[in-house]
Image: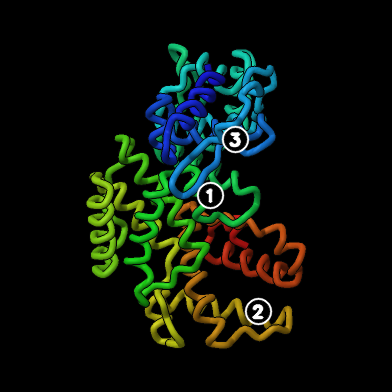
Amino acid sequence: MTINKKKNLILYLWEQNVPCTAAELADVLNVSVRTVKMYVKEINALAHQKVVLSSNKGYTALKTSDLSFLDEPQTFAMSYAERSVYIIKKILIEHRPLNTFDLCDELFISYSTLKSDLAKMNTLYQSFHVHFSTQNDLIQIQGSEKDKRTLLSSIIRQETHSRILDLDTLKQSFSPAEIEKISQILNDFFKQGTYNLNNFSYTNLLLHFAILIERVKTGNSLSEIREIMTKNPDELALVRQLSDRIEQDFSITLNACEKNEIYIFFKTNINYLVDSNYDKLREVIGEDVLDVIVKIMAEVSQLYSIDLKHESFIIPFGLHIKALITRASLGKYNRNPLSEKIKQDCPIIYDIAIFIALRLSEIYQVAIAEDEV
């Protein structure tokens, strides 16, 4: 029973003379690291005080604590939304078989409630083309590997509650050590003065790489094998080096499709660094894209009486638009947790952005998501 495991967690900590890591507690209790963290959260919530203390060295427990609160009928109940995220992460990140009856015990819900949750999830996540079912009392997520990764990315962003995704949020979902390792790879490859990698793109890449690596580690690779989309020798060399580094650091093998995903991550999130060099901008984004941007800026000037024809604006804007068109052509887009705030606080700028997005949609025959506006 879950209650006994919580008691065992505290009793084990009482017996230790030094702090215990979540990984050590997970081994002792035969649960996942994420479950250990959930137990700690629930224990402290039920006790209405800090019974289990955490530090950068691990967990300790107050030896004077009265554990009678764990015998009371009250529970730390999750909402339906929290339970659905919990189930998805258990299957797609921790890769643990979820027995329906064990899960009911763990979440303090009835079997009928769990079945109702799965039915709701099939409706809520229908747009991701996945299906939640039970077979031999085990919960499964059916769907393509691509769709499962898209679902996982979405629910992790959902947990930010309209805040910008950050390292702490990612470390709650994935191994902190692995997130740090991926962060170091990004620093080594994309912060050397050749590329422009802002904070938004940085955390976006961290999330995508974390999902890719976690899934491949457990044998869940993308199955559609195809060649890297680019023929640019510099980009090919970068993808090759980056893939080699990931394979080496995480002891995995990336197939051609996974390497293509890495190229797409690179192409849709990272811009070349072009410092006040109009000719270099033309070379990077192409003459046709630059002509479109200049044309649209002239239209903005005529409609809104705002002159954007300055190098300090055109260069970063041109790089951004090139990446945006690439994303849109691939059916991808970046999520923007600040979109509602921008609408409210910057209505004129938002109105101009809508105009530009509509013009780009007309010219390139692509759909531009509201988050990208």
Q: Amino acid at mark 3?
A: Val
Count neighbours of disc 2 (C-alpha within 10 A) and say few if under 14, some if 14 to 19, many if 20 or more: some
Q: Say which quarter of the image contains residue 21.
A: top left
Is disc 3 placed on a helix, strand or loop?
A: loop
**Circle 3 sits on which residue?**
51
- Please provide percent x and percent y for residue 58: 45, 43
Q: Considering only order in the chain, which callout, 2 or 3, is on the residue closer to the N terminus? A: 3
Q: In the rendered image of this protein, does residue 310 appear above or below residue 254?
A: below
Q: CA distance from mark 1 to mark 3?
A: 24 Å
Q: Say which quarter of the image contains residue 86.
A: top right
User: Seen in the image, is 39 located left or right of residue 49?
Assistant: left
Residue 143 seen anywhere in this rendered image of the structure: no
Q: CA distance from mark 1 to mark 2?
A: 41 Å
Q: In the rendered image of this protein, does residue 150 appear above or below residue 353?
A: above
- Please provide percent x and percent y for residue 258: 31, 48
Pick the front one: 177 or 109: 177
- Please provide percent x and percent y for residue 171: 47, 48
Q: Considering only order in the chain, which callout, 2 or 1, is on the residue closer to the N terminus? A: 1
Q: Amino acid at mark 1?
A: Thr
Q: Say which quarter of the image contains residue 95.
A: top left
Count neighbours of disc 3 (C-alpha within 10 A) and say few if under 14, some if 14 to 19, many if 20 or more: many
- Label 1 or label 2, whichever lies nearer to me, is 1
Pick the front one: 345 or 176: 176
Which of the numbered marks, if any, corresponds to residue 284? none
**Circle 1 sits on which residue?**
169
